Image (cartoon, rainbow, N blue to C red):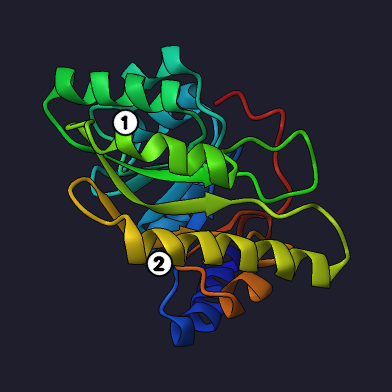
Amino acid sequence: MQIASKITEVSNELAPYRARLVAVSKTHPAEAIQEAYDCGQRIFGENKVQELTDKAEALPKDIQWHMIGHLQRNKVKFIAPFVSLIHSVDSLRLLEEINKQGEKFQRKIPCLLQIHIAKEESKFGFDRKELLDALPFIHKMNWIQIKGLMGMATFTEDHAQVRSEFQELRSIFNELKKDHCSGNIAMEELSMGMSGDYKIALEEGSTLIRIGTTIFGNRNYNNPQ
C-alpha cells in the first residue's frame, strides 16, 4: 500500500498545477509497477532500452512508456514501435534516427528536445543556439512529433540556482511556443523536476514531473530486469 499512498500524495500535489506524474520505475521490478498501475498510474519512465522493452512485454498494454534516459541511436529501433514519449532527444543525429525508425514502423514518434540547463558537464542536451539552428532541419522530419522540452537542473541544495535553471528552460519553451510552432513542432509539454526539486519545477510551469524514489523507494541496482 505504500506505493499507492505515495502516488496519491504526489498526484494531489500536482493536481492544482495540472501537471502529470511520470513514475520513474527504472531498476524496480514489474510487481512494483503493477502495484502502481492498480491504483491508477499509467505513465512510467525508464532510462534503459532493454529494461523498458522487457517491462512493456510483461505489463499491461495500456501503459504509456516514457524513455527518460540518454538514448543511443542504435537502440531507437527497439522502442520505436510503441514508446509513448522520448524525453531525452539531445542531438540532431538522434532525431534523424528516430525519424528513420518512425518511417520504418509507420508511426510518428512523440519526442521532447532535451535542453542543457545545468552547470554540470555530465548532463546532455541542446544549448539555445544549437536548438535554434536545428529547427529548420527538424521541420523537415515527417515521422517525429516534437511535443515540448525537457531539462535537468544541477544536482545542488541551492534552490535559487535550480529555480533559475528551470526559468531558463521555461523561457526557451515560451520562445519556441511563440515563434516556432508549426507542422511537427508543438510546445505542449515541459518535462522538468524530479524527486528532489519537483516542487520548484511545478512553480515554474512543469507539465511532466519525473519521480521515482519518492514513490518506489531507493533503487534496486541488483534487480536483474
Front in this rendered view, residue 131 or 52: 131
> Vertically, is 46 above or below 195?
above
Residue 139 position by quadrant: top left
Quadrant in which the N terminus is drawn: bottom right
Residue 125 position by quadrant: top right
> Vertically, is 74 above or below 50?
above
Residue for point 37% across, 28% down? 95
Q: Mark 1 points at which residue?
A: 137
Residue for point 63% across, 44% down? 116
Numbered disc 1: secondary structure: helix
Q: Which residue lies furthest to the right in this view?
A: 157
Numbered disc 2: secondary structure: loop
Quadrant in which the C terminus is drawn: top right
Residue flagged by tag 2: what amino acid is it?
Cys
- Horizontal and vertical percent position of residue 209: 53, 63
Task: Please report contact status of discs 2 and 1: CB closer than 8 Å, yes or no.
Answer: no
Tell me if mark 2 has few (under 14), some (14-19) or many (20+) residues whose alpha carbon lies within 10 angstroms of its own. Answer: some
User: Is residue 192 in view from this perspective?
Assistant: yes
Q: Mark 2 points at which residue?
A: 39
Residue for point 47% across, 57% down? 22
Front in this rendered view, residue 224 or 157: 157
Residue flagged by tag 1: what amino acid is it?
Phe
